[in-house]
Image (spheres, rainbow, N blue to C red):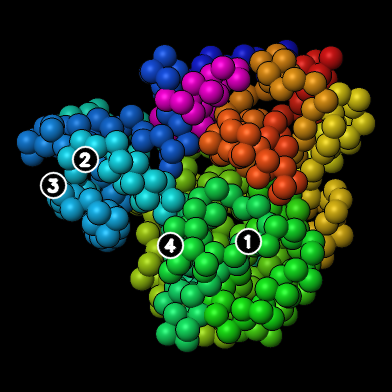
Amino acid sequence: MQAFSHIPLGESIPDRPHAVSCSLPTMAAVRGYEEKDPAVMGLLEAGYPRFVVHPLARRLTSELAARRGLRARTLWLASSRAMAGTLLAHMRLAGAADAAPFESDGVWGVSHPESAAAFQLAKQYLQNVGGFISSREAEDRLFALGLGPVPAEEESFAGDAASEVRRVLAPLFGGAAARDLLLANCGMNAVHAAFRAISALQAPRGRTAWVQLGWLYLDTIAILRKFTASASDYIHVADVVDLAALRRVLEERGPGIAGVVAEIPTNPLVQTPDVEALNALCRAHGARLVLDPSLVSAFSVDCLAHADLVATSLTKYTGSDGDIVAGLLAVNPAGPDAGFLRTAAAAAIEAPYGRDLARLAAQIGKTAEVLARIEEGTPRVAAFLSSHPAVRTVHWALGPPSGAAYLRVARSPGATGGIISFTLRGPLAHFYDRLRLPKGPSFGMSTTLICPFMYLAHYDLVTSEAGRAQLRVNGIDPELLRLSVGTEPVDEIIGALAEALS
């Protein structure tokens, strides 16, 4: 029996109430999703939670808006009172003077008059910083209001879930104390909390500029672009391998640089800088370093000793069932200003909702086993793709130009994570539409998952000549595919790829 079969458009991946992905089985569906085509959006059972408001959250929003007489306004429900407050401040600062706070039945948010500009302003902010209400919280609130059924049963941890998650994670961070492992409601919120903590530390010192090393995940780029003090305070060093370019920037602007952000490795080109040398450069110039190992997970790379803060998604790999969103911000206790950063980050971070944390605690213990199966198959899939005449380029953790740098932080020679990005010699749609693998956003699941990453992450760039030129300058093919290897039999994964490549 084949491991893979067609998943209809919009069906949740996995088939669970709080799934973090959804099936986009054709390039037409991908374009419809990005362009918000009602014919596509109407079929979505869910979507990646920071991009598509969960149906349960939409229902709760609608019900509360009706109860408070807000049908003529747009209402956004936030993950906490504090998040609602930062959203309100952001909107008013941007000119949305009619934005107003909302509170009802223990839920907080912001409402504003119906306006496309205000809609985008609010949605983008909540997406960038991870501020949407949890789907599980929405489910619980609906039930408490008598508007929904009893929440579906699921495996969850019965004890102190936060302690259990930290117990599993602590050995990966040198036996870190609980106070140095800050749990977040998602990985992007951990990144944002790191940004805010370092900014609070460095701004009084006259340091307001930030450096983005390489092409990073879109919301990390958005945080650095949008929330720095001025346009000139955003600095992009494109080549992660060329640390001489970063050295020149630090020598020219060092006294004004607050921090450097790097992914270990980068998403989607899977490139790793020389982390030890990067850390030494930052130390020498007084910049604080944030590392994000989400693409392979902290189970596969050891990087806290080389950073001030490590921000990572726990949705990926640790949430391998694909139905939980969470993140982590780890503080290096030996780093300069660790005490300040610990306090500032704890004040900025959004804690996970209780049921989400209990669900994470129930599955985090199997992460090492799941990763071992994923990492057993990843080199074989990479080798297959690299040797296939229909494949143009392949990027993975041990590939050129930075495989040696990756191995210096890898926990073992086989600790590669499960991501392989590749491009084709032929048309993308011909391959993608024929492929039997599950197709949708996210990665790091037990389920193999593939997507045309640049279309989902940067649709504005892939659909314009100027945008495509910008991607090419950064070494990115707009038609790049990102494959997340799962735990299915590797021969079945390769067989599905071979079939579509033929």
- Span highlighted in magenta in the image: 11-36
Distance between the Cα atoms at labels 4 and 1? 15 Å
Residue on which the image places disc 1? 236
Check the image and report above or below for 322 versus 25.
below
Residue on which the image places disc 4? 227
Instruction: Inspect this view and state whether residue 193 appears.
Output: yes
Mark 3 falls on what kind of element?
A: strand
Mark 1 falls on what kind of element?
A: strand
Residue 497, quarter of the rendered image: top right
Distance between the Cα atoms at labels 4 and 2? 23 Å
Is 147 left or right of 8, judged from the image as shown?
left
Distance between the Cα atoms at labels 3 and 1? 42 Å
Mark 2 falls on what kind of element?
A: strand
Residue 228 at x, y = what percent?
46, 66
The three-letter code of the residue at mark 4 reads Phe
* Image quadrant where one finds the N terminus: top right
Residue 167 at x, y = what percent?
54, 64
Residue 87, quarter of the rendered image: bottom left
Please tell me whether mark 3 or mark 2 is closer to you in this view: 2
Residue on which the image places disc 3? 104
Mark 4 falls on what kind of element?
A: helix
Q: Are marks 3 and 4 in contact (CB under 8 Å)?
A: no
Q: Residues within 10 Å of mark 4 (few under 14, many from 20)?
A: some
Instruction: Inspect this view and state whether residue 163 appears.
Output: no
Please tell me whether mark 3 or mark 1 is closer to you in this view: 1
The three-letter code of the residue at mark 2 reads Leu
